[in-house]
Image (spheres, rainbow, N blue to C red):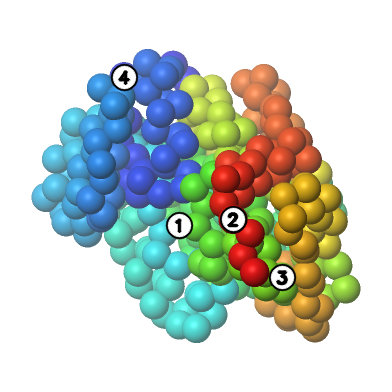
Amino acid sequence: MPKSSSTLLIGGAGFIGSHLAPLLAQNGRQVQVLGRSEIAQQKIPTIQYIQGDFNNADLLEALVKQNNEVVHLAYATVPNTSFNDPLLDLNENLPPVLRLMQLCAKHQKRLVLLSSGGAVYGQSQSVPIAEDHPTLPISPYGLTKLTIEHYAYLFSVSHGLSYISLRPGNPYGLGQIPFRGQGFIATALALIEQNRAVQVFGSQGTIRDYLEINDLAAGILAAMDHGQVGQIYNIGSGVGRSNLDVLNTLAPIVAKLGYEVQIEQLPARPFDVAVNVLDSTKLMSISGWKPKIDLQDGLESLVDSLFLGKPKAS
């Protein structure tokens, strides 16, 4: 798919969007970012930041009409919190996306959906997980994400919606906010800095496909440039690492700065997907994209950015 000249990022001021927006601008796109919070204007002339509510129908339609494609990054819940109120998870996330699909179909704009590479598949029957793996979510979050994908297909058939769906692994990197119920590495580093123990559920913790945020942004761009309408693409490293693996990799890195990794071992939780490792062959074959930053290098760079120059807490 050729590059579009203009892209709207909904929820684009968040962790993923803050890395994706500059990359899109560097690759020739005019970018609009819609977010609820006030954002200091970055010094990138091809990025326009707009403070507004995704649920404002008039604003949303005006922005959709101005762009060639829309990337939907906004989501109101995370896997852990979705269990607290499954109905809220559904109501907060599904209706706004359905309105967005209607608008994109009406104005013939391509929609790029960021789904979930872990939650939609559920417990893996084989690894690495390809896009045709059964989808049996075990969380309300995963079920809502999968429902959104199904609605996109429905709108493509009934309203001519042009869309692609992307299923990323577990991104980590600079700018990820800890203690949100998502982002094990960000939370682990925050706890290490505070001299607190990191909780690991089960003997090793869950096994995940960790992807440095710049690699994820590059993967999203590759899918936008080369992906076929109506297709689903995994974006992952293809390497599975347990929570304990991550902490063992972090330990010598933070030790150089005087920090220690403390672990609190807890029983496994029934709602955690045990193993999730993604097969990204489909995206690689059409675009040439592949991850460039291995976990060791990514963690060293992240620790340097977050810890250097800070006094160690007593």
Q: Residue 288 carries which label?
A: none
Q: Name the residue under label 2.
A: 311
Do the residues bearing badges 3 and 1 touch, measured as CB atoms within 8 Å? Answer: no
State the quadrant of the C terminus. bottom right
Q: How far apart are marks 4 and 1 (CA)?
A: 26 Å
Tag in front: 3 or 2: 2
Do the residues bearing badges 2 and 4 touch, measured as CB atoms within 8 Å? Answer: no
Name above or below for residue 155 compared with residue 96: above
Name above or below for residue 164 compared with residue 51: above
In the displayed structure image, the side of residue 12 where residue 301 appears, left or right: right
Q: Residue at x 78, y 70 (%)?
A: 262
In the displayed structure image, the side of residue 113 where residue 189 appears, left or right: right
Find numbered disc 3 in the image and state the secondary structure of the residue it sits on. strand
Residue 299 sits in which quadrant? Answer: top right
Mark 2 residue type: Pro
Local packing at callout 3 (Cα closer than 10 Å; few below 14, some 14-19, many 20+) is many
Q: Distance between the residues labelled 3 and 1?
A: 33 Å
Tag in front: 2 or 4: 2
Q: Which residue is drawn at 75% across and 41% down?
A: 295
Q: Name the residue under label 3.
A: 198
